Amino acid sequence: MEKTKVEIVFQVGCVVNSVDQVLENLRTYFELEEETIVIKSSKERAEQGVRVENTYNGRPTDFHIKTARLNFGGIDLEYVEPLNKDGGDPYSDWLKEHGPGIHHINMKLADRSIIDRIMAEKNIPIHILSKTGGLELETYDFRQMFGFIAELGDMVVGPMKDTYYNGEKEK
């Protein structure tokens, strides 16, 4: 069977009720690198004309999230707050079913198309697909197979990106 290599696991994503409250809690107990905190809202970006196409379990879905990313001990920690708490999208459904906590790990593969082919052959659908301009990310719900949800994107972000893109990654 064809395989691909995981080049780097660089992010842990958590779903939370409130990004602002979590950041306040983190600041209470940890020294944070404030300059690494990046807060974004897909709703604000949509109002600025940034178009995102989302698919959730194979269905087009319109939803908005607020995110905060920061360097936390050398890994990119991402907090995702669904702006709709009623369900019907991946993050509010997660929050309703599981409560706040770890949702996914983000990794860069040597060849993502191999995983896409294998999953298609096994009838394992893409859990979430988001396209913004020329970039896309997808998640697969691998919890039954591997014990985690994997986010597979086109680029590495956070504190590990410099090492990855400056050629210091393992060959």
Image (cartoon, rainbow, N blue to C red):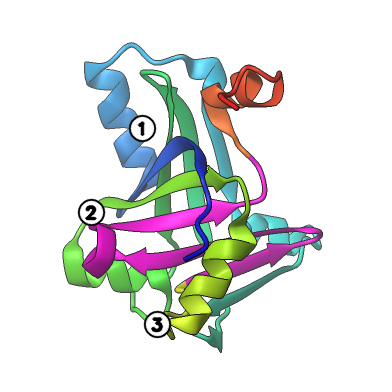
Q: Secondary structure at mark 3?
A: loop
- Residue bearing the label numbered 3: 88
- Residue bearing the label numbered 2: 100
**Closer to the observer: label 2 or label 1?**
2
Range covered by the magenta-colored residues: 128-155
x, y percent for residue 125? 46, 80
Q: Does residue 161 appear anywhere in the picture?
A: yes
Q: Is residue 135 above or below residue 159?
A: below
Q: Residue at x 47, y 66 (%)?
A: 1
- Quarter where residue 95 is shown: bottom left
3 or 2: tag closer to the N-terminus = 3
Q: Residue at x 52, y 80 (%)?
A: 120
- Residue bearing the label numbered 1: 23
Q: Is residue 69 above or below residue 60?
A: above
Q: Are marks 3 and 2 in contact (CB under 8 Å)?
A: no
- Quarter where residue 168 is shown: top right
| Distance of label 3 from label 2 (alpha carbons) | 17 Å
Q: Amino acid at mark 3?
A: Gly
x, y percent for residue 48? 78, 57
